[in-house]
Amino acid sequence: MNHRIPLLAAGLVGAAGIAAGAFGAHALRPSLIALGTYDAWQTAVHYHLLHAVALAAVAGWMRGERGPAALRRAAWAVWSWIVGVALFSGSLYLIATGGPRWLGPVTPVGGIALILGWLWIAAAAWAGEDA
């Protein structure tokens, strides 16, 4: 994977996160407060945007001279974060707007994907430059 994929993902995930934050703070705020789910929406936005920044950082890191093992592990982190944001933040967005409660178990699966992404970053660092 070259640096363009995580950079593209960072741009798309970041734009969607800003849109979700603005939508929740303005158009949905009264409904979310009435449902008691405003905090869940804000948590979804927080993790969404945090991982957009992380994707951009990994894109920058991948531009340097890296060994193939480190790049493979960083690629796993990228995909883990993309899946994690979709499952974690996506399920929270849906639940916060009155979506089905069966989505509840999806949220921790997304959280696990986000954690795995960070562990893949650690593994990429462990691989070093020559691996």
Image (tube, grey):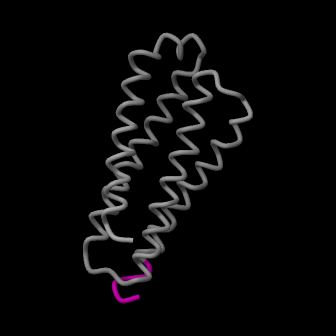
Q: Residue at point 59% right, 30% down? A: 94
Image quadrant where one finds the C terminus: bottom left
x and y, in percent, of residue 5 in the image = 36, 61
| Above or below, 12 relative to 120 | above
Find out whether residue 130 is within the magenta segment.
yes
x and y, in percent, of residue 76 in the image = 49, 67
* Main SS category, magenta section: loop
Find out whether residue 24 is within the magenta segment.
no
x and y, in percent, of residue 83 in the image = 54, 53
Q: Is residue 5 left or right of residue 33?
A: left
Q: Residue at point 58% right, 45% down? A: 87
Task: Name the residue nearer the viewer: 118 or 68.
Answer: 68
x and y, in percent, of residue 111 in the image = 58, 49
Q: Is residue 127 left or right of residue 66?
A: right
Q: Which residues are magenta?
A: 126-131
Q: Residue furthest bottom?
A: 130
Q: Residue furthest right?
A: 102
| Above or below, 63 relative to 118 | below
Q: Is residue 62 left or right of residue 91?
A: left
